[in-house]
Amino acid sequence: MKSGLSFVCPTSVSPWGTYLSQVDRVTPYLGELARWVETLKHPKRALIVDVPIELDDGTVAHYEGYRVQHNLSRGPGKGGVRFHPDVTLEEVMALSAWMTVKCAAVNLPYGGAKGGIRVDPRKLSHKELERLTRRYTSEIGAIIGPQQDIPAPDVNTNAKIMAWMMDTYSINRGATATGVVTGKPIHLGGSLGRVRATGRGVFVTGREASRRLGLELGDARVAVQGFGNVGSVAAELFAAAGAKIVAVQDHSGTLVNERGFDVAHLQDFSAKYGGIDGFKEGDRIDGEAFWDVRADILIPAALEGQLTADRARRITSKIVLEGANGPTLPQADDVLADRGVWVIPDVICNAGGVTVSYFEWVQDFSSFFWSEDEINQRLDRIILGALDQIWAKADEHKIPLRTATYAVACERILAARQERGLYP
Ligand code: GLU
């Protein structure tokens, strides 16, 4: 898991270190294409930008922003933009690499990219957030575009922010370019079903995994970490299928409810108060105790590196659905495999979002928009088809689903790399 890159020093818990170890694990299954595997360990392009803005009190603040294009062998870069106080270049590199693998796993014609700004958006006013987004978009404007690299929402970014990005890029180019970002508002070329697509994909892969493993959703206990766009929609869909959401954790606190949460109530509360803390229909427990709550399905849908080896030893779930990107450390993967826990890896489990982003991009180009039913049907077909292929690969080689997903995806990426060849 040596990086070969001078500016990162991967440790076993860093996101880039996690990614490199995932690539190392798939290499024995790549056959002749293993010749090209180093390509996956080197991001194609990484841009660091200074984002200065005037705050409402008249002072000037500087934020550090990034856009990394990890691999463009299969098409334009694709991936979200994250606003978070802990964002680093190294994290964005890992997130961009996971986008490369994700797009290939579900066979979308994209490479992988990701962006971010190291900022706590909760501390900015609406106007400050707009200035930050617009200046960042201008700074990365040279490398994004509908045919080059297409940003989208991620942690702490949403349709409103995508509208500002689209508008800024369009003003700078002198023409409206709706296809430069996805996850836009519906009346600006956004797609029906996009907001709920990631949570829907988590549910659809989870329902299929449960079916294959003989777990009745009607009796299932579900624990969800992260109650944002991904976790809250997945929780809602599992509850609608009869499962009990027995534990929820977010940045504000951890709640349990033996009878199962009323997810709609919790969503309303969280939207109003900016978190789940204070919700009366549940008992507050210590954050670390979340991992000990008895559950059949665990959905880490927050940030990277949450499922450590120690936590992996304690969980009681049979299925882990990775709604977040990179929530499981490699050592935890080993523990889970030993314990017979099935992990549906992020690069397929949360691929619903980028799949509907692809639909949005296609709809923008053809200026012809589909119904929500059509979108959901196509989404389910793509995700379930990909999962079927991955499960067959896992059975064939007797390997965990993550390695199998990487095998399917990396074959596609490296075959494209080989066909294109090196230049000059
Ligand atoms: N941020 C989402 C992800 O991690 C969506 C990316 C996109 O739609 O391009 O998959």
Image (tube, rainbow, N blue to C red):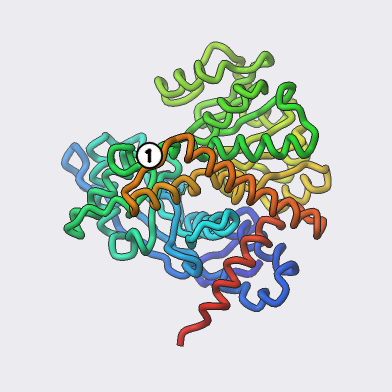
* Left or right of 339 in this view: 18: left
**38 or 210, nearer to the observer:** 210
Residue 380, horizontal then vertical, whole percent: 58, 41
Q: Is residue 259 left or right of residue 184?
A: right
Q: Nearer the viewer, residue 371 or 353?
A: 371
Q: Residue at x 62, y 37 (%)?
A: 204
The residue lying at 35 percent from left, 42 percent from top is 190
Q: How many marks?
A: 1
Q: Amino acid at mark 1?
A: Asn
Split into 4 quadrants, where in the image is the C terminus?
A: bottom left
Secondary structure type for disc 1: loop
**Residue 308 drawn above or below residue 196:** below
User: In the drawing, does residue 386 fall left or right of residue 176?
Assistant: right
The image shows residue 165 at horizontal and vertical percentages of: 29, 49
Q: Is residue 322 above or below residue 175?
A: above
> Ligand 1 within 8 A of label 1's CB?
no
Quarter of the figure with the N terminus: bottom right
How packed is label 1: few (under 14 Cα within 10 Å), some, or many (20 or more)? some
Outermost residue on the top side: it is 280
Q: Tell me: 163 left or right of 14.
A: left
Task: In the displayed orientation, state which residue is furthest to the bottom.
Answer: 424
Residue beneath the point at 55% across and 56% down = 98
267 over 6 or under it: above or below:
above
Residue 90 visible to an observer of this rendering = no
Residue 9 at least partly seen: yes
Residue nearest the viewer, comparing 180 with 191: 191
Residue drawn at the location 79% of the way across and 37% of the way down:
213
- Residue 66, horizontal then vertical, whole percent: 39, 57
Please name the residue that numbered disc 1 is placed on: 158
Percent position (x, y) of residue 261?
Answer: 60, 17
